[in-house]
Image (spheres, rainbow, N blue to C red):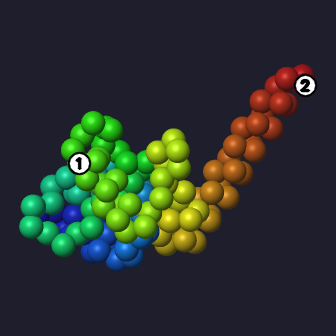
Amino acid sequence: MNPFYHRIYRVVRHIPKGRVATYGIIARLAGRPGAARTVGWALSALPEDNDVPWWRVINAAGRISFSGQDHSAVLQRALLLREGVRFAPGGAVSLSTFGWPAEAYDSAVASHKRAASTRRSRRLKGLRT
């Protein structure tokens, strides 16, 4: 098996009950920033009898990546709810509340706000000229 997959599984095993992590954060913690898709592939390659809490990994929008009708999506949501993770009415999990490690989401939220502010400033500057 791919050695990177083993690192991914090791990181995912550290996500505490009642918390979630994004594919991107898992990739970064496993030593390969930007390899979020590989995290998804690794989790989908898990054998049936494993101890990796795959359901604690969600996408960067705080959502379950499986389609809503997929059995895996229903199972993932049920497992997260059982652990105390709450979903907003739109179906997203608050990463600032449930994200692990918390400091990763504090900085991600801050950088997202900075990037949005920069984009907004550029748009406004274009309107002023």
Residue 12 visible in the snapshot: yes
Q: Is residue 100 left or right of residue 128?
A: left
Q: CA distance from mark 2 to mark 1?
A: 49 Å
Q: The N terminus is located in which quarter?
A: bottom left
In the rendered view, tell whether residue 15 sits above or below residue 93: below
What's the residue at 47%, 45% (across, down)? 91
In the rendered view, tell whether residue 71 sits above or below residue 42: above
The residue beneath circle 1 is 72
Question: Which picture quadrant has residue 21?
Answer: bottom left
Q: Is residue 121 left or right of residue 85?
A: right
> Between 22 and 48, which is closer to the camera in this rendering?
48
The residue beneath circle 2 is 128
Where does residue 81 sit, x and y in percent of width and height? 38, 60
Where does residue 4 sit, x and y in percent of width and height? 24, 65
Question: Which picture quadrant has residue 66?
Answer: top left
What's the residue at 25%, 53% (across, down)? 75
Where does residue 42 sit, x and y in percent of width and height? 22, 57
Where does residue 5 sit, x and y in percent of width and height? 22, 64
What's the residue at 51%, 41% (across, down)? 90
**Residue at the right extreme?**
128
Residue 32 visible in the snapshot: no
What's the residue at 29%, 47% (across, down)? 73
Q: Secondary structure at mark 1?
A: helix
In the rendered view, tell whether residue 62 sits above or below residue 127: below
